[in-house]
Amino acid sequence: MPKRLTLAVSQSHTLAITSATLSALSSTAHSASRSNVHLLLFPEAYLGGYPRTCSFGATVGSRSDEGREQFLQYYQNAIDLGDTPRGAGDDWVERRLEVAKGKEYRGDGTREELEKVARETGVFLVVGVVERAGGSLYCGVLYVCPREGCVGKRRKVMPQMLTRTLGKTGSERLIWAQGSPSTLKAIKTTIAGVEITLAAAICWENYMPLLRYSLYSQNVNLYLAPTADARDTWLPLMRTIACESRAYVLSANQCVRRKHLPPWIHGAASLLEQNNKQQQQPPMPANTMETDNVHDDTTAISSTEEPIPKTPQPTAADSTALGAPSPSPLRLGGATPSPIKHRTTNNPRRRSLNITPIPDNHFLALPGEPQTSAIEDSEAIEEANTTSENQDVPTTNTAHHPDPSTSSSKDDENENEFISHGGSCIISPSGSVLAGPLWDIENHLLIAKNIDFEDCERGRLDLDVAGSYSRNDAFELKVQGLDFCPPP
């Protein structure tokens, strides 16, 4: 008997405060439930937020008071799940930790709220979170079963060293502590009669071959990759992981405009002031729009959620192409790049440079009017390189190619500028793209129907990297605190 499920990823962005994001999550889950979705993945740091562009006032050897205030705001907006800094593991899952006198549960109630949403919708939720425990923050993933509640939680073991976005540099390792490798434990559950072994690798953990292998060794057939990476190199990585693991791969990323960043990043308002504003604006109900795109027996659907607050939605013509696989064009997505403009001086002895990015990370430098100085010509070339490195320009947009005017320089403060282009996708065990990637589409559900999990077993005929293709008599991997035996 075929083992088929409907899976979905939510390409949605964090709102200004956690309570508003929880309301949006609930609306998204109810929308997914109406589409008969069994499991739904949210992006990395969806609850708590990914503080893109924020440096927290830190440079080598120095921290600023403003940066400490920003961290305070970020810390207070993180969720408290009632776990310990070291991580209590099964004791936390089974609620065996001591509860304070007069309270019904540990933490701030986020766990209980997520369990309620899963129970009401019947959808298995996998949610990227920023969790506070003690005085530290952890980037993590929660597994929430509609029957049993939270059945697992893991913390990112390797936050990125540097995150470069539009010329601004910040460090995940500055704000997030390292999680225990023991949390890489896979989760085994039954959904609609189908046995699933699932596990998550967060963002650049997917670039760690040994970490990936630790998940393969637990015989996962559903590999989850919440991320903040919107570069065009992400899709090939997801296809490689699917082919290696012979598992279905789901990846969810946030699609974010500059105006979606919380006010405290720019020092515009305090968290308390923003909280008062948000509490006066009740969330809007979700609205679903679906378009079929068939790949053999698998149906890929793109659904639009009503954003909170409301943002423009793609047209019907845009939605028709969602989920369709497409070839990989050049990095600039086929668009004609515009020359990068630079400041000038009154020095008539130097000619300006018009620096134009072209494919393969090359630049075309053409002489312009004799205005800039030699120093500024050098700065122009450096700025062009910085701009190219930090623009997450998508290679494919199954809805539409992004307008080149939205890919601006690091000084462009246009509030509608995309600072994360998304790129959420669903991949088959053979490495084929079933749905996505979604580029520059906000608050969207990407749904793949009729997912046959027997395809994972069919794929093991010629490749089982943790079994018949492992040469485990010659190679051995050990992870502290982690048992590689597949969960019972």
Image: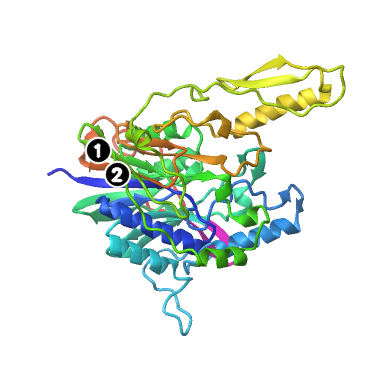
> Residue 169: x percent and y percent?
66, 43
- Mark earlier in primary sequence (1, 2): 2
Is 1 located above or below residue 396 in the figure? below
Type of the residue with mark 1? Thr
Q: Nearer the viewer, residue 117 or 142?
A: 117
The amino acid sitting under disc 2 is Asn
Q: Is residue 132 magenta?
A: yes
Q: Which residues are magenta?
A: 129-138
The overriding secondary structure of the stretch rendered in magenta is strand
Residue found at x 41% / y 55%: 127
Comparing 292 with 381, the one in front is 292
Q: Along the horizontal axis of the image, is 419 left or right of 110?
A: right
**Could you tell me which residue is drawn at 25 percent across and 32 percent down?**
295
Q: In the image, is residue 403 above or below residue 363? A: below
Q: Disc 2 designates what residue?
A: 221
Q: Label 1 belongs to which residue?
A: 299
Q: Nearer the viewer, residue 39 or 92?
A: 39
Which quadrant of the view contains residue 442?
A: top left
